[in-house]
Image (spheres, rainbow, N blue to C red):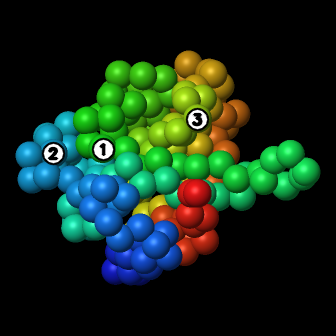
Amino acid sequence: MSEYIFEEAKKFIEKSGKTERNELGRTATNEEIELLKEKFGDKIPSWYYHLISELPIIHMEIGWQAYESDDDYDGIEYVKILEPKHMIEESFEYYPGIPIIEKGYVCIGGDPTGSGDPYFVNFDSDNPPVYQIYHDSGNEADEILTNGAAKVANSLTELFKNGIVSA
């Protein structure tokens, strides 16, 4: 399944039309991958390390249709793929990450508007769904996951395949 995620991420980069080095995101360094492995252990699969170390998706913004559009608002929200140090911070140092890391949820994206509502996946499946988890939805993992998790995409493949390119 991971090859589908990789291919859709690659297509998203191509679709973005961003070809200049200063327009693209970046890839994770070997040191960053080792740090992730040290902090997360087996919570992150090898294919995700391959994805972020081979494709320049770190710092890229992927849009999704969060709300119906109207005259003043297109209804699009964005996931900004986090660099490894921010994945660690959001998962281990801040809410909602602290309680839900024990349930296997790893922060992979931030909200570029600064809302404080990051994006998480649980890598228990080969092609996990993506959730935006609201920071003010509780203190306990079950409470947060029940009351504060909004599914953004049914899978990472879907996120990249249907992703809307930021302007």
Residue type at the position of mark 1: Glu
Residue type at the position of mark 2: Glu
Image coordinates of residue 5 in percent, x first then y, are 41, 73
User: Could you tell me which secondary element the residue under label 1 belongs to?
Assistant: loop
- Dot 1 or dot 2: first in sequence order is 2
Q: Marks 1 and 2: CB-CB under 8 Å?
A: yes
Image coordinates of residue 118 in percent, x first then y, are 52, 37
Q: Quadrant of the N terminus?
A: bottom left
**Label 2 packing within 10 angstroms: few (<14), some (14-19), many (20+):** some
Of residues 71 and 62, which is closer to you in this image? 71
- Dot 1 or dot 3: first in sequence order is 1
User: Could you tell me which secondary element the residue under label 3 belongs to?
Assistant: loop
Tell which tag, 3 or 2, sits nearer the viewer. 3
Query: Vertically, is 115 above or below 3?
Result: above
Residue type at the position of mark 3: Thr
User: Could you tell me which secondary element the residue under label 2 belongs to?
Assistant: helix
Q: Is residue 136 visible?
A: yes
Q: Is residue 156 left or right of residue 145?
A: left
Label 3, label 2: how far apart the Cα atoms are? 25 Å
Q: Which residue is mark 3?
A: 113
Q: Marks 1 and 3: CB-CB under 8 Å?
A: no
Q: Residue at x 37, y 33 (%)?
A: 91
Q: Residue at x 42, y 22 (%)?
A: 94
Label 1, label 3: how far apart the Cα atoms are? 17 Å
